[in-house]
Image (cartoon, grey):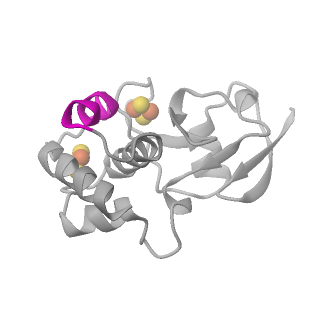
Amino acid sequence: MPTFSLNINGKDYSIDAEPEMPLLWAIRDYAGLTGTKFSCGIAQCGACIVHIDGAPVKSCSFPLSAVAGKRITTIEGLSENNDHPVQVAWIEEQVPQCGYCQSGQIMAAVALLDQNPNPSDEEIDMAMTGVLCRCGTYPRIKKAIRKASKLS
Ligand code: FES
Ligand code: FES
């Protein structure tokens, strides 16, 4: 079985696994970072979004062989004290309901604001399409993204 070197949230990991193993398994089961969630497993819901070199990726459907040498960031790596502007806005707007989708939502929002610090409502809709919330927190998500764009 090959060994893969991963850098997750600035920390190096050596993982013995099959090349096609989803990155999400490495994050949750090998690195023990459980903030990133598994839901559909087929790149449809966004619960598993992390950043690879700053870009949002659905880690349930991204093979380990494609991430060697890249910088992976999970929800745990956003800030030490939950004080990333998006996290602050999320808390102030009390966005989560059950919470299951929320790390994916936050990671998608952070990637959007990194690329486009002042997105229009249409740009927010486009960036967040495909990040599903069964609790229907979409209005609060949008409000929090608008707030975070002013805090950044
Ligand atoms: S669990 Fe990865 S997109 Fe749904
Ligand atoms: S807060 Fe429950 S699924 Fe989004």
Taking depth in this image into account, of 19 and 71 the one nearest to the observer is: 71
Magenta-colored span = 120-132
- Relative to 91, say whether 123 is above or below: above
In the visual, does 121 lie left or right of 68?
Answer: left
Magenta span main SS? helix
Quarter of the image where the C terminus is located = bottom left
- Relative to 9, say whether 37 is above or below: above
Quarter of the image where the N terminus is located = top right
Taking depth in this image into account, of 4 and 127 the one nearest to the observer is: 127
Residue 146 forms part of the magenta stretch: no
Instruction: Pinpoint residue 9: horizontal percent, then vertical percent.
Output: 64, 57
Instruction: Pinpoint residue 56: horizontal percent, then vertical percent.
Output: 50, 37
Instruction: Pinpoint residue 27: horizontal percent, then vertical percent.
Output: 61, 48
In the visual, does 111 lie left or right of 74?
Answer: left
Taking depth in this image into account, of 74 and 89 the one nearest to the observer is: 89
- Relative to 45, say whether 135 is above or below: below
In the visual, does 12 lie left or right of 116?
Answer: right
